[in-house]
Image (cartoon, rainbow, N blue to C red):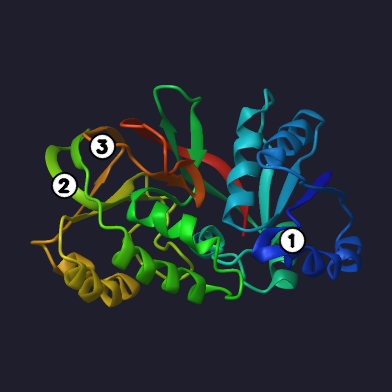
Amino acid sequence: MKTKLIVNPNADLGRAWRTAADLRYLVEEYGGADWAGTVYPTHAIELARQAAEAGYELIIAAGGDGTVHEVLNGILQAQVEPKPRLGVIPLGSGNDFSFAVGIDPKPALALRQAFQGSPRRIDLGVFQTPHGPREYFDNALGIGFDTTVTIRSRKLTWLRGFLIYLVAVLQTIILNHEAPHLKVVTDVESWEDSSIFFVMGNGRREGGGFLVTPDARPDDGLLHYMSIRQVSRLKMLRLLPEVIRGTHGNFKRDVRMGTLTRMELHADHPLYVNADGEIISGFGSDLRDLQVELIPGAIEVMV
């Protein structure tokens, strides 16, 4: 297949470029690819869209979850049919999407899957804010706690992998304890509650090891949600190991879980939102309304 390989050199705190460079001869063994590197935020969206419209049949995202997020958005923005297939070389600190779809964590083996594996058609979520375009997410859309964790994690440059997110989680529990009041209407149910942590998962995992939506599968035709109600800091610390194991659903007094395919959400305070670890609205924003929908079988991934 005509292949474009898009590398984010800044993934994994700048370590991804060296790893990608070590793969260049292996890429040639599999038939070669045209390489491109990202140099600014959203650049991978532009590169992927251009590649799709130029007739590339396979577009490989080499980077973290944010790189994959941008590449698949670029593919789906392209006015072409059929859409190119997506390959992934996990070079980030979390790599939760590649975990969800079954891509090997070792870059060399993931590269082989991208070139020689089988296509798997997966669902995607899409969200809309009052002032922004529709945007797809592949693994998780998070509101509140996990967005603050993501913002804090980017300052922990001396750590790697899961430990980055664990330290950022502990910082967030201690320093940030907001719980906006949410009004939620889905295709299944509606409710109002104060929520510290609200996530819609297409995959099981966030933050490189937290099983936030443990029953989610990227091809089951559903988004799985999890909400932790307003609880004390001590209770959040108690729930932390449960979220790592994926057993927090047993705490039904504090945790709400379910499934949906459409959702409208309104909050009484500004929302902190991230999509696949990409910050949509952070500190200082005034986003209070959000619409989410599942798009079944939206893209093919090589696994």
Left or right for 192, reference 301 = left
Please tell me which residue lies in front, 88 or 179. Answer: 179
On the image, the x and y values in percent for residue 90 come to: 65, 63
Label 1 or label 2, whichever comes before in sequence order: 1
Left or right for 68, reference 228 = right
Q: How many marks?
A: 3
On the image, the x and y values in percent for residue 274 come to: 45, 46
Query: Residue drawn 52% across and 59% down?
Result: 101
Residue named by callout 2: 194
Q: Quadrant of residue 187?
A: top left
Mark pair 1, 2: CA separation: 47 Å
Per the image, label 1 sits on a secondary structure element best described as helix
Residue named by callout 3: 269
Please tell me which residue lies in front, 49 or 274. Answer: 274
Number of residues whose C-alpha sits closer than 10 Å to that of mark 2, classed few (under 14), some (14–19) or many (20 or more):
some
On the image, the x and y values in percent for residue 37 come to: 81, 49
Label 3 or label 1, whichever comes before in sequence order: 1
**277 in relation to 190, above or below:** below
Residue named by callout 1: 116
Mark pair 3, 2: CA separation: 11 Å
Mark pair 3, 1: CA separation: 48 Å
Number of residues whose C-alpha sits closer than 10 Å to that of mark 1, classed few (under 14), some (14–19) or many (20 or more):
few
On the image, the x and y values in percent for residue 236 come to: 23, 68
